[in-house]
Image: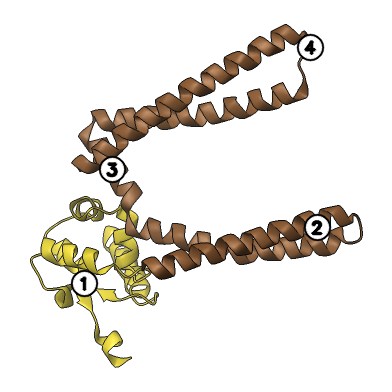
Amino acid sequence: MEAYKKELKWKIVLTAISLFFIAVSMGVLIFLMLYEGETPNWIKAYLGFFLGISIVMVESLVKNVRAIKNETRLKAKYIEETDERLTLIEHKTGTAIFPIYYLCLVVAMAVAVHINVTVVITLAFALLLQVAIKLIIQAYYKRKL
Amino acid sequence: MTFLAKRAILFMQSKLYTAGDALKTKIPEFRKRQKLSQEELALAVGVTRQTITSIEVGKYTASLVLAYKIAKFFDQHIEDIFDFSEAEDE
C-alpha cells in the first residue's frame, strides 16, 4: 500500500504541475483575446479544450488528495484500480474496439469514395496507422510476455 | 415470506451457480460458515465485491493469485474451494 501511496503522491504532483501550466496557457489566451478585441475561433477552441481538461484534472486531483488523507478511501481506490476482473474487462474492451473500428473505417471509406477522394485517402491512412499501431503493440507484448 | 424469499434466492443462486463457463466454487458455503459478507471477503483479499459475486456465480474464474488468497483466507487448499473436476475431464 505504501508503494501505491507514493505513486498517488506523484500523480498529485504531476496533476498540480500540469494544472499550473494549463492555467498559465489559459491566462495567455485570455490576454490575447482581450488584446485582439474580437475573439478568434482558434482561441475559443483552445480555451474550451483547456477548460475541459482542467475540470477533469481538478476532479482527479481532489479524489487523489482525499484518498491520500483517508486509509479506507485509499484502500478502496487501490482495490478499484487493481481489481483483476475490472482489468480483464478493460483488456477485453480494448481488444474488441479494434475490429469494430476497422469495420467502421472501411464502411466510411466505401461511402467516401462516392463523395471525396481526399477523405478516402485520409481514412485509408488512419486505417493503416491503426493496423501499424496494433502490430507494434502485439510485437512488443510477444517479446515481453 | 422470508422463508420463501430465501428459497427463491437459493434457487436462483443454484441456477446461476452453473450458468457460467468459469470454475465452480464453494466460496458461498465457506462465507456462510464464517458469517462473512461478500464485501468483507472482497476487502480481505483485495478485490471488489462484484468480483467475488462473479466468481461465486461462475461468471469469472479467479486468477491463481486470487484463488490462493481466497483459499489462504479460509485456511483451505485451493482445490477445497474451487472445483477442478470439469477441468480434469477436459
- How far apart are the two marked residues, 1 and 4, measured between alpha carbons? 70 Å
Q: Residue at x 34, y 32 (%)?
A: A64
Residues at badges 2 and 4 in contact (C-beta under 8 Å)?
A: no
Q: Position of residue B25 (x, y in %)?
A: 25, 73
Same chain for mark 2 and mark 4? The answer is: yes
- How far apart are the two marked residues, 3 and 2, measured between alpha carbons? 48 Å
Residues at badges 1 and 2 in contact (C-beta under 8 Å)?
A: no
Q: Which mark is residue A76?
A: 3
Return the residue nearer the eye: B57 or A143.
Answer: A143
Q: Residue at x 65, y 10 (%)?
A: A31
Residues at badges 4 and 3 in contact (C-beta under 8 Å)?
A: no
Q: Position of residue B75 (x, y in %)?
A: 7, 66
Q: Colour of chain A?
A: brown
Q: Which residue is mark 4?
A: A38
Residues at badges 1 and 4 in contact (C-beta under 8 Å)?
A: no
Q: Quadrant of residue A26?
A: top right
Return the residue nearer the eye: B78 or A139.
Answer: A139
Local crowd size for mark 3, using a 10 Å CA cut-off: few (<14), some (14–19), many (≥20) = some
Q: Colour of chain B?
A: yellow
Return the residue nearer the eye: A34 or B46.
Answer: A34
Local crowd size for mark 2, using a 10 Å CA cut-off: few (<14), some (14–19), many (≥20) = some
